Image (cartoon, rainbow, N blue to C red):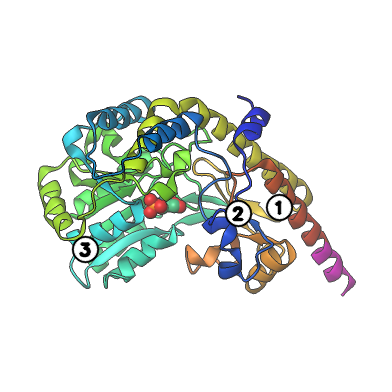
Protein backbone atom coordinates (compact mmCIF):
# COMPACT_ATOMS: atom_id res chain seq x y z
CA UNK A 1 0.00 0.00 0.00
CA UNK A 2 1.37 3.42 -0.81
CA UNK A 3 1.10 6.32 1.63
CA UNK A 4 -2.12 7.67 0.17
CA UNK A 5 -3.81 4.27 0.09
CA UNK A 6 -2.70 3.59 3.67
CA UNK A 7 -4.00 6.95 4.92
CA UNK A 8 -7.28 6.59 3.00
CA UNK A 9 -7.84 3.21 4.58
CA UNK A 10 -6.47 3.66 8.09
CA UNK A 11 -6.28 7.35 9.03
CA UNK A 12 -9.13 8.35 11.31
CA UNK A 13 -10.43 11.32 13.31
CA UNK A 14 -10.18 10.39 16.98
CA UNK A 15 -12.07 13.28 18.54
CA UNK A 16 -14.96 12.19 20.71
CA UNK A 17 -13.58 8.70 21.41
CA UNK A 18 -12.15 9.28 24.92
CA UNK A 19 -8.73 9.52 23.34
CA UNK A 20 -6.13 10.73 25.82
CA UNK A 21 -4.23 12.42 23.00
CA UNK A 22 -7.16 14.42 21.57
CA UNK A 23 -10.02 14.44 24.05
CA UNK A 24 -7.91 15.27 27.11
CA UNK A 25 -6.26 18.31 25.52
CA UNK A 26 -8.38 20.66 27.57
CA UNK A 27 -7.45 18.98 30.82
CA UNK A 28 -3.77 18.61 30.05
CA UNK A 29 -3.02 21.71 27.99
CA UNK A 30 -5.93 23.97 29.00
CA UNK A 31 -6.87 24.31 25.34
CA UNK A 32 -8.91 21.77 23.41
CA UNK A 33 -8.28 23.23 19.96
CA UNK A 34 -4.66 22.25 19.52
CA UNK A 35 -3.17 19.79 17.06
CA UNK A 36 -2.31 16.79 19.22
CA UNK A 37 1.26 15.63 18.59
CA UNK A 38 2.18 14.52 22.07
CA UNK A 39 1.58 11.07 23.59
CA UNK A 40 2.98 8.13 21.59
CA UNK A 41 0.00 6.61 19.85
CA UNK A 42 -1.27 7.13 16.33
CA UNK A 43 -4.15 8.35 14.21
CA UNK A 44 -4.15 5.04 12.31
CA UNK A 45 -6.50 2.14 12.81
CA UNK A 46 -4.80 -1.10 13.69
CA UNK A 47 -4.35 -3.64 10.82
CA UNK A 48 -7.61 -4.94 9.36
CA UNK A 49 -6.68 -8.51 10.35
CA UNK A 50 -6.51 -7.38 13.99
CA UNK A 51 -9.94 -5.78 13.80
CA UNK A 52 -11.35 -8.97 12.22
CA UNK A 53 -9.81 -11.19 14.91
CA UNK A 54 -11.24 -8.99 17.64
CA UNK A 55 -14.68 -8.94 16.00
CA UNK A 56 -14.67 -12.71 15.89
CA UNK A 57 -13.79 -12.87 19.55
CA UNK A 58 -16.46 -10.32 20.44
CA UNK A 59 -19.13 -12.24 18.52
CA UNK A 60 -18.44 -15.27 20.69
CA UNK A 61 -19.75 -13.12 23.51
CA UNK A 62 -17.83 -14.71 26.39
CA UNK A 63 -15.08 -12.77 28.08
CA UNK A 64 -14.27 -15.02 31.00
CA UNK A 65 -10.85 -15.78 32.52
CA UNK A 66 -8.40 -16.95 29.92
CA UNK A 67 -4.89 -18.28 29.61
CA UNK A 68 -2.21 -17.56 27.03
CA UNK A 69 -2.63 -20.08 24.21
CA UNK A 70 0.32 -21.75 22.49
CA UNK A 71 -0.69 -19.94 19.30
CA UNK A 72 0.07 -16.63 21.01
CA UNK A 73 3.54 -17.76 22.09
CA UNK A 74 4.19 -19.02 18.56
CA UNK A 75 3.13 -15.69 17.05
CA UNK A 76 5.34 -13.65 19.37
CA UNK A 77 8.31 -16.01 19.16
CA UNK A 78 8.12 -16.04 15.35
CA UNK A 79 7.93 -12.26 15.27
CA UNK A 80 11.05 -11.88 17.38
CA UNK A 81 12.89 -14.45 15.30
CA UNK A 82 11.88 -13.08 11.91
CA UNK A 83 12.07 -9.39 12.71
CA UNK A 84 14.96 -9.27 15.15
CA UNK A 85 16.83 -12.52 14.81
CA UNK A 86 16.11 -13.14 18.48
CA UNK A 87 15.21 -16.70 19.50
CA UNK A 88 13.01 -16.50 22.56
CA UNK A 89 12.08 -19.57 24.60
CA UNK A 90 8.50 -19.87 25.77
CA UNK A 91 9.74 -20.39 29.37
CA UNK A 92 11.42 -16.98 29.34
CA UNK A 93 8.18 -15.06 28.74
CA UNK A 94 5.93 -13.34 31.28
CA UNK A 95 3.17 -10.77 30.80
CA UNK A 96 2.30 -7.37 32.16
CA UNK A 97 -0.47 -4.89 31.61
CA UNK A 98 1.88 -2.39 30.00
CA UNK A 99 5.59 -1.67 29.98
CA UNK A 100 5.56 1.19 32.49
CA UNK A 101 3.97 -0.88 35.25
CA UNK A 102 6.61 -3.55 34.60
CA UNK A 103 9.36 -0.96 35.07
CA UNK A 104 7.89 -0.13 38.48
CA UNK A 105 7.89 -3.84 39.36
CA UNK A 106 11.53 -4.30 38.34
CA UNK A 107 12.64 -1.36 40.44
CA UNK A 108 10.88 -2.88 43.44
CA UNK A 109 11.90 -6.47 42.80
CA UNK A 110 15.58 -5.89 42.07
CA UNK A 111 16.57 -2.92 44.23
CA UNK A 112 16.07 -1.81 47.83
CA UNK A 113 14.90 1.59 49.09
CA UNK A 114 17.65 4.20 48.59
CA UNK A 115 19.53 2.01 46.09
CA UNK A 116 20.70 3.87 42.99
CA UNK A 117 19.17 3.30 39.57
CA UNK A 118 20.70 4.85 36.46
CA UNK A 119 19.02 6.13 33.30
CA UNK A 120 20.46 7.85 30.24
CA UNK A 121 18.82 11.22 29.71
CA UNK A 122 16.95 12.80 28.02
CA UNK A 123 14.63 9.82 28.28
CA UNK A 124 10.93 8.90 28.46
CA UNK A 125 9.74 10.53 31.68
CA UNK A 126 8.17 7.44 33.35
CA UNK A 127 11.73 6.08 33.62
CA UNK A 128 12.47 8.93 36.04
CA UNK A 129 9.20 8.37 37.87
CA UNK A 130 9.61 4.61 38.25
CA UNK A 131 12.78 5.28 40.23
CA UNK A 132 11.66 8.33 42.20
CA UNK A 133 8.14 7.13 43.00
CA UNK A 134 9.60 3.99 44.54
CA UNK A 135 11.99 5.85 46.82
CA UNK A 136 15.15 4.89 44.95
CA UNK A 137 17.98 7.26 44.11
CA UNK A 138 17.80 8.49 40.53
CA UNK A 139 21.16 8.75 38.80
CA UNK A 140 21.26 10.26 35.33
CA UNK A 141 23.92 10.20 32.67
CA UNK A 142 23.31 12.82 30.01
CA UNK A 143 23.74 11.95 26.35
CA UNK A 144 26.25 14.00 24.35
CA UNK A 145 24.45 16.24 21.89
CA UNK A 146 26.55 17.21 18.89
CA UNK A 147 24.44 19.42 16.62
CA UNK A 148 21.40 17.25 17.30
CA UNK A 149 23.19 13.90 17.01
CA UNK A 150 23.19 12.01 20.31
CA UNK A 151 25.83 9.63 21.62
CA UNK A 152 26.44 7.97 24.96
CA UNK A 153 28.97 9.45 27.36
CA UNK A 154 30.41 6.09 28.41
CA UNK A 155 32.96 7.57 30.81
CA UNK A 156 30.30 9.53 32.63
CA UNK A 157 27.98 6.50 32.66
CA UNK A 158 30.65 4.30 34.25
CA UNK A 159 31.80 7.00 36.67
CA UNK A 160 28.23 7.52 37.87
CA UNK A 161 27.75 3.79 38.35
CA UNK A 162 30.90 3.48 40.45
CA UNK A 163 30.38 6.62 42.50
CA UNK A 164 26.77 5.77 43.33
CA UNK A 165 27.05 2.01 43.66
CA UNK A 166 24.29 1.66 41.04
CA UNK A 167 22.26 -1.57 41.09
CA UNK A 168 19.99 -1.24 38.08
CA UNK A 169 20.09 0.41 34.66
CA UNK A 170 16.90 1.10 32.71
CA UNK A 171 17.81 1.27 29.05
CA UNK A 172 15.67 2.66 26.23
CA UNK A 173 16.33 0.96 22.91
CA UNK A 174 15.46 2.51 20.47
CA UNK A 175 15.74 5.69 22.47
CA UNK A 176 12.76 7.92 23.14
CA UNK A 177 12.98 10.93 22.63
CA UNK A 178 16.25 11.23 20.66
CA UNK A 179 15.35 8.62 18.05
CA UNK A 180 18.60 6.66 18.26
CA UNK A 181 18.80 3.02 17.22
CA UNK A 182 21.91 2.03 19.16
CA UNK A 183 24.57 0.16 17.21
CA UNK A 184 25.79 -3.22 18.38
CA UNK A 185 29.10 -1.60 19.30
CA UNK A 186 27.41 1.02 21.47
CA UNK A 187 25.23 -1.58 23.14
CA UNK A 188 28.19 -3.85 23.75
CA UNK A 189 30.07 -1.07 25.47
CA UNK A 190 27.07 -0.12 27.61
CA UNK A 191 26.23 -3.69 28.58
CA UNK A 192 29.85 -4.56 29.32
CA UNK A 193 30.11 -1.63 31.74
CA UNK A 194 26.98 -2.90 33.49
CA UNK A 195 28.28 -6.43 33.66
CA UNK A 196 31.63 -5.28 35.01
CA UNK A 197 29.96 -3.44 37.88
CA UNK A 198 27.18 -5.96 38.55
CA UNK A 199 24.44 -3.63 37.38
CA UNK A 200 21.30 -5.45 36.26
CA UNK A 201 19.96 -4.18 32.93
CA UNK A 202 16.31 -3.64 32.06
CA UNK A 203 16.03 -3.04 28.33
CA UNK A 204 12.81 -1.34 27.27
CA UNK A 205 12.45 -2.30 23.61
CA UNK A 206 8.88 -1.19 23.08
CA UNK A 207 9.92 0.81 19.97
CA UNK A 208 11.89 -2.10 18.49
CA UNK A 209 9.77 -2.38 15.35
CA UNK A 210 9.73 1.31 14.46
CA UNK A 211 13.03 1.46 12.62
CA UNK A 212 13.14 4.16 9.96
CA UNK A 213 16.85 4.81 9.42
CA UNK A 214 19.76 2.63 8.37
CA UNK A 215 20.81 1.18 11.74
CA UNK A 216 19.70 -2.34 12.56
CA UNK A 217 17.88 -2.77 15.85
CA UNK A 218 19.72 -5.16 18.16
CA UNK A 219 17.77 -6.69 21.03
CA UNK A 220 20.10 -6.37 24.02
CA UNK A 221 19.83 -10.14 24.50
CA UNK A 222 21.62 -10.93 21.23
CA UNK A 223 24.34 -8.28 21.36
CA UNK A 224 27.78 -9.82 20.78
CA UNK A 225 26.41 -13.32 20.40
CA UNK A 226 24.20 -13.13 23.50
CA UNK A 227 27.08 -12.42 25.86
CA UNK A 228 24.94 -10.22 28.15
CA UNK A 229 21.65 -12.14 28.10
CA UNK A 230 22.30 -13.46 31.60
CA UNK A 231 22.30 -10.01 33.11
CA UNK A 232 19.15 -8.79 31.45
CA UNK A 233 15.43 -8.25 31.53
CA UNK A 234 13.81 -7.24 28.25
CA UNK A 235 10.38 -5.66 27.96
CA UNK A 236 8.56 -5.29 24.70
CA UNK A 237 5.01 -4.99 23.40
CA UNK A 238 2.92 -4.76 20.26
CA UNK A 239 1.41 -1.51 21.52
CA UNK A 240 3.60 1.07 19.74
CA UNK A 241 4.06 -1.08 16.64
CA UNK A 242 0.36 -1.70 15.97
CA UNK A 243 -1.31 1.10 17.94
CA UNK A 244 -2.71 -1.17 20.64
CA UNK A 245 -1.67 0.75 23.79
CA UNK A 246 -5.20 0.80 25.24
CA UNK A 247 -5.29 -3.01 25.29
CA UNK A 248 -2.57 -3.26 27.95
CA UNK A 249 -0.61 -6.25 26.82
CA UNK A 250 3.17 -6.51 26.98
CA UNK A 251 5.90 -9.10 27.32
CA UNK A 252 8.73 -9.52 29.81
CA UNK A 253 11.62 -11.74 28.72
CA UNK A 254 14.10 -13.17 31.22
CA UNK A 255 16.42 -16.00 30.25
CA UNK A 256 18.45 -16.18 33.45
CA UNK A 257 16.78 -18.65 35.82
CA UNK A 258 17.84 -16.91 39.01
CA UNK A 259 16.58 -13.54 37.81
CA UNK A 260 13.37 -15.20 36.68
CA UNK A 261 12.87 -16.89 40.06
CA UNK A 262 13.33 -13.55 41.79
CA UNK A 263 10.94 -11.88 39.38
CA UNK A 264 8.31 -14.60 39.79
CA UNK A 265 8.52 -14.40 43.58
CA UNK A 266 8.01 -10.65 43.43
CA UNK A 267 5.30 -10.85 40.76
CA UNK A 268 3.25 -13.09 43.05
CA UNK A 269 2.88 -10.15 45.42
CA UNK A 270 1.70 -7.60 42.85
CA UNK A 271 0.47 -9.25 39.69
CA UNK A 272 -2.66 -11.23 40.29
CA UNK A 273 -4.33 -10.08 37.09
CA UNK A 274 -5.08 -12.71 34.50
CA UNK A 275 -4.21 -11.87 30.91
CA UNK A 276 -6.45 -9.56 28.92
CA UNK A 277 -8.30 -11.63 26.39
CA UNK A 278 -8.77 -8.79 23.87
CA UNK A 279 -5.15 -7.70 24.19
CA UNK A 280 -3.94 -11.20 23.45
CA UNK A 281 -6.34 -11.65 20.55
CA UNK A 282 -5.22 -8.38 18.99
CA UNK A 283 -1.52 -8.94 19.53
CA UNK A 284 -1.55 -12.47 18.14
CA UNK A 285 -3.29 -11.31 14.96
CA UNK A 286 -0.93 -8.35 14.67
CA UNK A 287 2.19 -10.48 15.01
CA UNK A 288 0.83 -12.99 12.50
CA UNK A 289 -0.65 -10.64 9.92
CA UNK A 290 0.57 -7.10 10.60
CA UNK A 291 3.84 -6.98 8.70
CA UNK A 292 2.54 -5.40 5.51
CA UNK A 293 0.61 -2.78 7.47
CA UNK A 294 3.76 -2.02 9.47
CA UNK A 295 5.79 -1.51 6.31
CA UNK A 296 3.27 1.04 5.06
CA UNK A 297 3.21 2.74 8.44
CA UNK A 298 7.00 3.08 8.39
CA UNK A 299 6.73 4.73 4.96
CA UNK A 300 4.28 7.27 6.38
CA UNK A 301 6.57 8.02 9.32
CA UNK A 302 9.56 8.48 6.99
CA UNK A 303 7.47 10.70 4.72
CA UNK A 304 6.26 12.85 7.63
CA UNK A 305 9.70 13.18 9.16
CA UNK A 306 11.31 14.07 5.81
CA UNK A 307 8.59 16.63 5.13
CA UNK A 308 9.23 18.23 8.51
CA UNK A 309 12.98 18.17 8.08
CA UNK A 310 13.12 19.44 4.51
CA UNK A 311 10.73 22.30 5.09
CA UNK A 312 12.13 23.42 8.41
CA UNK A 313 15.71 23.16 7.13
CA UNK A 314 14.78 25.43 4.27
CA UNK A 315 12.60 27.99 6.04
CA UNK A 316 13.78 27.82 9.65
CA UNK A 317 17.35 26.51 9.43
CA UNK A 318 18.25 27.39 13.00
CA UNK A 319 15.89 24.70 14.31
CA UNK A 320 18.05 21.64 14.94
CA UNK A 321 16.23 18.44 14.01
CA UNK A 322 17.70 15.25 15.39
CA UNK A 323 18.08 12.43 12.82
CA UNK A 324 15.27 9.91 13.23
CA UNK A 325 16.65 6.37 13.23
CA UNK A 326 13.91 4.76 15.27
CA UNK A 327 10.63 5.53 17.08
CA UNK A 328 8.12 7.89 15.49
CA UNK A 329 9.10 10.83 17.67
CA UNK A 330 10.87 13.82 16.17
CA UNK A 331 13.10 15.82 18.52
CA UNK A 332 13.56 19.50 17.78
CA UNK A 333 15.84 22.09 19.36
CA UNK A 334 14.12 25.47 19.02
CA UNK A 335 16.70 27.47 20.93
CA UNK A 336 18.11 29.03 17.76
CA UNK A 337 14.94 31.12 17.59
CA UNK A 338 13.04 30.84 20.84
CA UNK A 339 14.22 31.69 24.33
CA UNK A 340 13.83 28.39 26.28
CA UNK A 341 11.57 30.06 28.82
CA UNK A 342 9.15 30.97 26.00
CA UNK A 343 9.00 27.52 24.37
CA UNK A 344 5.56 26.65 25.69
CA UNK A 345 4.06 29.98 24.64
CA UNK A 346 5.63 29.65 21.21
CA UNK A 347 4.74 26.04 20.44
CA UNK A 348 1.35 25.90 22.13
CA UNK A 349 -0.16 29.38 22.04
CA UNK A 350 1.36 30.55 18.75
CA UNK A 351 1.87 27.34 16.74
CA UNK A 352 -1.23 25.67 18.21
CA UNK A 353 0.54 22.37 18.86
CA UNK A 354 0.19 20.07 21.87
CA UNK A 355 3.66 18.54 22.25
CA UNK A 356 5.87 17.09 24.94
CA UNK A 357 8.32 19.74 26.16
CA UNK A 358 12.00 18.84 26.45
CA UNK A 359 12.30 19.39 30.19
CA UNK A 360 10.10 16.41 31.02
CA UNK A 361 12.81 14.18 29.50
CA UNK A 362 15.78 15.98 31.07
CA UNK A 363 16.16 19.17 33.06
CA UNK A 364 18.83 20.14 30.50
CA UNK A 365 16.38 20.05 27.61
CA UNK A 366 14.40 23.22 28.11
CA UNK A 367 13.89 24.66 24.62
CA UNK A 368 13.40 21.27 22.97
CA UNK A 369 10.12 19.72 21.86
CA UNK A 370 9.06 16.20 20.86
CA UNK A 371 6.62 15.82 17.99
CA UNK A 372 4.76 12.62 17.16
CA UNK A 373 5.13 11.73 13.46
CA UNK A 374 2.82 8.68 13.46
CA UNK A 375 -0.09 10.66 12.21
CA UNK A 376 -1.89 11.73 9.09
CA UNK A 377 0.46 13.86 6.94
CA UNK A 378 -2.15 16.63 7.02
CA UNK A 379 -1.35 17.30 10.69
CA UNK A 380 2.39 17.39 10.01
CA UNK A 381 1.78 19.84 7.16
CA UNK A 382 -0.26 22.07 9.49
CA UNK A 383 2.39 21.85 12.20
CA UNK A 384 5.19 22.75 9.80
CA UNK A 385 3.19 25.64 8.35
CA UNK A 386 2.44 27.00 11.83
CA UNK A 387 6.04 26.70 12.99
CA UNK A 388 7.46 28.42 9.92
CA UNK A 389 4.86 31.17 10.03
CA UNK A 390 5.55 31.94 13.68
CA UNK A 391 9.32 31.80 13.28
CA UNK A 392 8.98 34.31 10.44
CA UNK A 393 6.79 36.56 12.58
CA UNK A 394 9.23 36.27 15.45
CA UNK A 395 12.18 37.15 13.25
CA UNK A 396 10.40 40.13 11.71
CA UNK A 397 9.36 41.47 15.09
CA UNK A 398 12.91 41.12 16.38
CA UNK A 399 14.16 42.84 13.26
CA UNK A 400 11.80 45.78 13.86
CA UNK A 401 13.05 46.26 17.42
C1 LIG B 1 10.17 3.84 25.95
C2 LIG B 1 8.73 3.63 26.31
N1 LIG B 1 8.39 2.70 27.20
C3 LIG B 1 7.10 2.47 27.54
C4 LIG B 1 6.09 3.22 26.98
C5 LIG B 1 4.67 2.99 27.39
O1 LIG B 1 4.41 1.66 27.58
P1 LIG B 1 3.01 1.16 28.15
O2 LIG B 1 1.95 1.99 27.53
O3 LIG B 1 2.98 -0.28 27.73
O4 LIG B 1 3.07 1.30 29.63
C6 LIG B 1 6.40 4.21 26.04
C7 LIG B 1 5.33 5.02 25.45
O5 LIG B 1 5.55 5.99 24.79
C8 LIG B 1 7.74 4.41 25.69
O6 LIG B 1 8.11 5.33 24.82
Q: Are marks 1 and 2 in contact (CB under 8 Å)?
A: yes
User: Which residue appears farthest toward the right when viewing the image?
Assistant: 400
Task: Tell me the CA gap for discs 1 and 3.
Answer: 41 Å
What type of secondary structure mainly makes up the magenta span? helix
Q: Does the magenta portion include 395?
A: yes
Which of the 4 image quarters holds residue 285? top left
Query: Which is nearer the eye, 151 or 288?
Result: 288
The residue depicted at 68 percent of the width and 47 percent of the height is 380
The residue depicted at 71 percent of the width and 68 percent of the height is 349
Q: Are marks 3 and 2 in contact (CB under 8 Å)?
A: no
The numbered mark, 1 or 2, whose residue comes first in the sequence reads 2
Query: Which is nearer the eye, 251 or 136?
Result: 251
The numbered mark, 3 or 2, whose residue comes first in the sequence reads 2
Query: Which is nearer the eye, 52 or 304?
Result: 52
Mark 2 surroundings within 10 Å by alpha-carbon count, few (fewer than 14), some (14 through 19), many (20 or more): many
Q: How many marks?
A: 3
**Image coordinates for residue 98, horizontal then vertical, percent:** 34, 51
Q: Secondary structure at mark 2?
A: loop
**Image coordinates for residue 140, horizontal then vertical, percent:** 37, 64
Magenta segment boundaries in residue numbering:
393-401
Q: Are marks 1 and 3 in contact (CB under 8 Å)?
A: no
Q: Secondary structure at mark 1?
A: helix
Q: From the viewer's perspective, is 278 left or right of 349?
A: left
Residue 152 visible somewhere in the drawing = no
Q: Which mark is residue 211?
A: none
Q: Which residue is mark 1?
A: 383
Q: Which residue is mark 3?
A: 108
Q: From the viewer's perspective, is 282 left or right of 11?
A: left
Which of the 4 image quarters holds residue 335? bottom right
Q: Secondary structure at mark 3?
A: helix
**Image coordinates for residue 100, horizontal then vertical, percent:** 35, 56
Amino acid sequence: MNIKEFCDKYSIDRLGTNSLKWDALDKRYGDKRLIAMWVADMEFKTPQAVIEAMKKRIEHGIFGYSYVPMSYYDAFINWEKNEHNYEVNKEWIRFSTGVVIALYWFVNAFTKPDDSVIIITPVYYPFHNAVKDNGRKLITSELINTDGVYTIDFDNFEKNIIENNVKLFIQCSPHNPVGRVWTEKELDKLLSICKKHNVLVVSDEIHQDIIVGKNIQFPAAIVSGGKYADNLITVTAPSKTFNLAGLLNSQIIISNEKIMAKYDAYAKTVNKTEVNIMGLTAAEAAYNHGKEWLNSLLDVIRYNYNYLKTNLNEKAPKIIITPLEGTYLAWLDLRGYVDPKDTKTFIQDKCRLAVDLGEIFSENCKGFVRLNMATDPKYVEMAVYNIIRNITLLENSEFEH
